Amino acid sequence: MSKAGTVALTALSVLYPCLVFVGLVRFGVQPRVLALCMAVIGLLLFLSVTGSRRAGKADRARRFAVSAVVGALAVAIAVSNSGVLLKLYPVVMTGSFLASFAFTLVRPPSMIERFARLQDKSLAEREDYPFIARYCRTVTVVWCVFFACNIAISLYTAFRASDLAWSVYNGLISYVLIGILFVGEMIVRRFVRGTR
């Protein structure tokens, strides 16, 4: 997929809760019309699978599965005109991240170790590699717990909270929490390095 497609996919995914809120509340747009936004995301995800030669088999399978679920959800919304189904997109995306991270706990190296290896190709050859692998596995578990909690809150806001609360959590608070966890892990990593 082209860079423009990647940028469009990222922008639509990040802005999705705000677009849904503005469409539903401000302009009174029917959910089935807003399902077009989800259908575009599903199409872009599918194109990212077919157009990427660098992605591994597992990553391609994950992207294909997510694009299929998003596409099916868009069709279900178009048929049912359900605002609740429209709000499940963040659950699907977070669920795909949870599945990806959890899979690497069963099939190592862990996701965080894979990220670390992208920065340091010789990571597995280092003297302290066993410690690094354990640390990366622990951080991967922390991310899995975060994603699971995020899914639970997203589901709650989709089914029980107002459109505004859903939009604020899924379009702002969840991103802030991701940032806090990311920065917090960087601080902990520096501290751990300093104590060894």
Image (cartoon, rainbow, N blue to C red):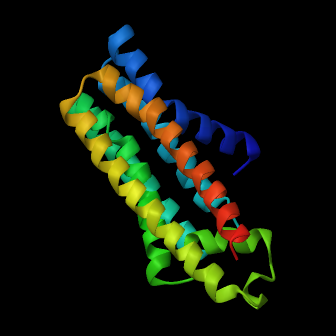
Please tell me whether residue 163 is drawn above or below residue 35 in the rendered image.
above
Count the numbered circles shown: 0
Query: Which residue is found at the position 48% from the left and 65% from the top?
Result: 62
State the image quarter where residue 121 is shown.
bottom right
Q: Quadrant of residue 25?
A: top left
Residue at 26% in and 28% down: 83
Q: Residue furthest top?
A: 27
Residue 20 horizontal side relative to residue 110, left or right: left
Residue at 59% over, 41% down: 9
Pinpoint residue 70: horizontal percent, then vertical percent.
Answer: 40, 48
Q: Is residue 176 above or below residue 193?
A: above
Query: What is the x, y in percent for residue 21?
Result: 38, 20
Residue 27 visible, this angle: no
The picture quadrant where one finds residue 165 is top left
The reply, left or right, for residue 143 in relation to residue 120 is left
Q: Nearer the viewer, residue 156 or 81?
A: 156
Quadrant in which the C terminus appears: bottom right
- The x, y position of residue 109, in whole percent, is 58, 81
Q: Residue at x 40, y 17 (%)?
A: 23
**In the rendered view, would you say 168 is above or below 51?**
above
Query: Closer to the camera, 147 or 2?
Result: 147
Question: Could you tell me residue 127's position as x and y percent?
Answer: 76, 90
Q: Residue furthest front?
A: 195
| Residue 117 visible from this viewpoint | yes
Left or right of residue 186, residue 3 in this image = right
Which residue is at the front of the view, 135 or 175?
135
